[in-house]
Amino acid sequence: MTGEPAGPREKCGVVGVSLDDRAAARPLYYALYALQHRGQESAGIVTHDGFQQHDHVEMGLVGDAFEARDLDGLAGQVGIGHVRYPTAGSVDASCAQPFSVSFKSGSLGLSHNGNLVNADEIRAELASEGHAFTSDGDTEVIAHDLARNLLQSDLVRAVRQTMERIHGSYALTIVHDDTVLGVRDPEGNRPLCIGRIDDGYILASESAAIDVLDGELVRDVRPGELVVLDDDGAGFESYQLVERDRTGHCFFEHVYFARPDSRIDGSLVYDVRRELGRKLWSESGVDSDVVMPVPDSGRAFASGYAEAAQEDGAGVEFAEGLMKNRYVGRTFIMPTQDARERAVRLKLNPIRDVVEGKTVTVIDDSIVRGTTSRQLVGLLRDVGAEAVHFRVGAPAIIAPCYMGIDMATREELIAADASVEEIRGEIGADSLSYLSVEAVAAALDASEADLCLGCVTGEYPYDIDGEAADRPVDRPEVGAPPADD
């Protein structure tokens, strides 16, 4: 048996660099370290030295996947990298990325963050044409489709043709021979940004990867945009290949996934989380003695909440009342019921002096199944909390995510068929409140219409079988001839 994760699990992280006169392998390695929070199952790098492609992909963390000799063997001034948490495909080396393919028109490496809705349809069509697949992941589908188009079209036209066929969320970094490019899906669901470093340019899922290379964030890749880095690191070219009337940015990037020191779509994640905390106080604040975060993502929420409370004259004190054991993995072996009950205590230990005899407000980023929240509330009562109020810095999760977040099914989601009061009773809190969708949009300075809110509304910006769409969607017809340019 394994322990329940504290919340939804990470997606993936992608990076690509093009440098002037320096090997790309180590900058890619450092950038992947900065994106390690986005995936811990596998890590990989593909480079090109102008003559041939080199790759090294292994299961495990970045620091375990590469040794110095591995980096030394990755020759070339251009390359891409990937850290993976599986959301489509198996948990094994066959789905580890970047995915590499050699074909008549050259070599191709591809890193993908996101999830396609119509991957099975395209895979079946390509297989009928003789394409042999080595994995069940959707990244290989994109790679094969792009390779097929490159046999007949130039790079920009080939990417456009692939974008016209794939449907879903994706941020891609691609190396085609010695050219690195980045592509963001037309809804902008998954993040991707451009940075300038001393001797070149970088594409990355988050700006923290640019910071670690002492670079400067240039801007976000626009939804539906193709960015092609110059092979000498001197600059980049931009092609707006697809345009939509509305975007579908994933609000959960700001709530949970991204590093607080990253900027995504123009906003610093830390500032957004603090503002979400302030709005949480405004909507459902309770004048308790102490407000404490569930580490780590709850910290900025709790800070903003406490600040807003104090501005209103409440006697709420911010305190780090829960200490996280960073040496316990996301899952671990728990053979007995007693061990499973001990799971939260292994990961989170309350500071008795902060909690005992106090009314406590706990702030977390989400409640998924409710098991962890229930055990946490019980733990705080065990060390003497007089009352435990639970606040969540996001709306209730009522539906699965199909766009690249490993989130539970409706049957496992506690909020899918339970009221807030029922959930409060289930976790044993004295009170429970979630943040409203309106507050999330306001904190992001965005329209609700331009966000992907599927997991909290049950309506998605894509045509997903059996689910409602939040907008008119034209799903690509697989097998149809490509549109004229």
Image: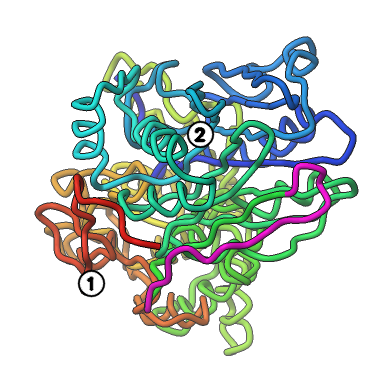
Query: Residue reaching furthest top?
Result: 69
Of circles 2 and 1, the one toward us is 1
Q: Residues within 10 Å of mark 1 (few under 14, many from 20)?
A: some
Residue bearing mark 2: 347
At x 34% / y 21%, what residue is drawn? Answer: 135
At x 82% / y 40%, what residue is drawn? Answer: 19
Of callouts 2 and 1, which one flags the residue occurring earlier in the amino acid sequence? 2
| Colour pattern | rainbow
The spot of residue 168 in percent (x, y) is 32, 52
Q: Amino acid at mark 1?
A: Asp
Please determine whether, in this image, residue 190 is positioned above or below residue 313: above
* C-alpha separation, residue under disc 2 versus residue under disc 1: 38 Å
Mark 1 element type: loop
Q: Does 234 lie within the magenta span?
A: yes
Residue bearing mark 1: 470
The spot of residue 337 in percent (x, y) is 26, 22
Image quadrant in which the N terminus is located: top left
Nearest the viewer among 267 and 475 is 475
At x 18% / y 54%, what residue is drawn? Answer: 464
Magenta segment's dominant SS is: loop
Left or right of 332? Residue 156 is right
The spot of residue 75 in percent (x, y) is 77, 20
Mark 2 element type: helix
The spot of residue 78 in percent (x, y) is 73, 34
Image quadrant in which the C terminus is located: bottom left
Q: Amino acid at mark 2?
A: Lys
Please determine whether, in this image, residue 234 is positioned above or below residue 269: above
User: Magenta region: which residues?
Assistant: 230-245
Left or right of 417? Residue 351 is right
Q: Residues within 10 Å of mark 2 (few under 14, many from 20)?
A: some
